[in-house]
Image (spheres, rainbow, N blue to C red):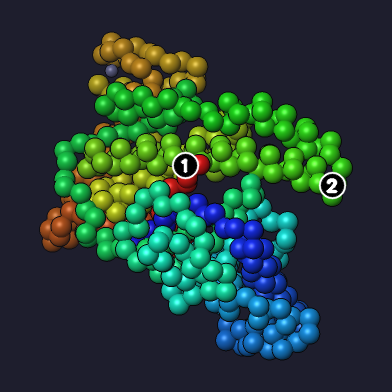
Amino acid sequence: MRLRYNYRLYPDDSQCQALARLFGCVRVVWNDALAMRKAARKAGLPWIGGGDLQKICITAAKRTLEREWLSEVSPVPLQQSLRDLDRAYQNFFDSVSGKRKGRRMGLPVFKSRRDRRQSARFTRNAFSLGGDGTLYLAKIGGIEVRWSRELPAAPSSVTVIQDAAGRYFASFVIEVEDAGQVLPEVDGEVGIDLGLTHYAVLSDGTKIANPRWLRRRAKRLARLQRTLSRKQKGSKNREKARIAVARQHAKVGDARRDFLHQTSTSIIRENQTVVIEDLAVRGLTRGRLAKSVSDASWAAFRTLLGGKAARFGRMVITVGRWFPSSQLCPCCGWQNGKVPLEVREWDCPSCGEHHDRDLAAALNVLAEGIRLRAQAAEASLDEGGQDKEMVAAGLADTENDCGGRVRPGEAIPTLAPPATYDAHAA
Ligand SMILES: [Zn+2]
């Protein structure tokens, strides 16, 4: 499994210039290669393979007058840029053919100097870690790193990133053996109800407050945005205002990431089985609740839970989105009609039990998850008594009659961004 470890970088002035030049070269190679493939397609010519692309857009280009500056930077990030382009095309093709699940991927697009995020990736042969804690990059030199936590193993690559707020980061990829990380088994089983009043309510009664980061900072952000819109295009002051806005956004992002990591880690540590609803998050983000929902970033939270479960040997069970979690009485199973959002508490007309809406939902989600797990185990007996987990794994992507899915954690597909263990130094 691949994990990412991120650290803040502090390049000096000349290194900042060298990095800016490198980002520019990486972008030019990407754009040249993309333009060539687009032109070839338009002219009905055959597909240009990765090897040929490298010869044309890097090796041959360096010998031309208008691209000779490509030789001023390390060739490794340029080659990686072409590999990224190939991957982008592959994702698009797989998405079209249905091989790749999830959101439909578009064709790769041209990169711009004005993009919010600039990056360049170095593989093993083009970077090294000095004993003094500096990160040495080919043709750039030793950059100061804020090591907020230790790297568990030698990284296989490092991506140098400049974000919209002008900050630099190093994102190391580490290959780890899944088995070595498995935590001792615990008895805990928990159902999670994600909501807006609380970020999450757990079936054990824990209520995790909604941090509403964006809301809290919205006023300040709005003021900065107004300042930005008043500045003249292309002016120095406009650039300053843009950076202020970007910094504010970056702060919100950091706070959100920290919160999601802390919350998901503690849930995974304390529980062997975690049951969560498969909410149609993508649908919700377009509705009236859009702002609160994307603020809550449930999708990212579920991805983190899945990644950590896979890593630590826990099981995440996803309950189908049509399961009426907020309509059932967890005591007697009586089904209410649709309960309006503003109803926070209710009494079961059948058994008389008094329920907190979110807690009841979490309990129902847990019960449904346990039912799905038992169903998977039974299916395993029918198939000759294989190991429970094996069958659960086999069911990973097959929807059962309730539309639920049982899986022992979600392994991280190599195409998706690896689980991120952020360590942003302020
Ligand atoms: Zn009841």
Q: Judge left or right: residue 378 versus residue 346.
A: left
Query: Hey, which quadrant is residue 373 in on the image?
Result: top left
The answer to whether mark 2 is within 8 Å of ligand 1 is no
- Residue 299 horizontal/vertical position (percent): 47, 43
Compared to 237, does 420 lie above or below? below
Which type of secondary structure does the marked residue at label 1 adopt?
Answer: helix
Front residue of this view, candidates 8 and 180? 8
Residue at 27 percent across and 64 percent down: it is 177
Compared to 65, does 357 lie above or below? above
Do we see residue 199 in this rendering? yes
- Residue 32 horizontal/vertical position (percent): 71, 76
Q: Which quadrant of the picture is home to ligand 1?
A: top left
In this view, the mark in front (2 or 1): 2
- Residue 282 horizontal/vertical position (percent): 55, 43
Which type of secondary structure does the marked residue at label 2 adopt?
Answer: loop
Q: Quadrant of the N terminus?
A: bottom left
Task: Report which residue position mark 1 lands on.
Answer: 257
Residue at 57 percent across and 58 percent down: it is 11
Front residue of this view, candidates 414 and 231? 231
Q: Amino acid at mark 2?
A: Ser
Residue at 62 percent across and 75 percent down: it is 73
Residue at 36 percent across and 24 percent down: it is 207
Task: Report which residue position mark 2 lands on.
Answer: 235
Front residue of this view, candidates 133 and 111? 133
Inter-mark Cα distance, 2 to 1: 33 Å
Whichever of callouts 2 and 1 sits on the residue coming sooner in the sequence is 2
- Residue 336 horizontal/vertical position (percent): 39, 21
Front residue of this view, candidates 68 and 277? 68
Q: Judge left or right: residue 70 versus residue 302.
A: right
Residues at marks 2 and 1 touching, judged by CB atoms closer than 8 Å: no
Compared to 174, does 211 lie above or below? above
Do we see residue 328 in this rendering? no
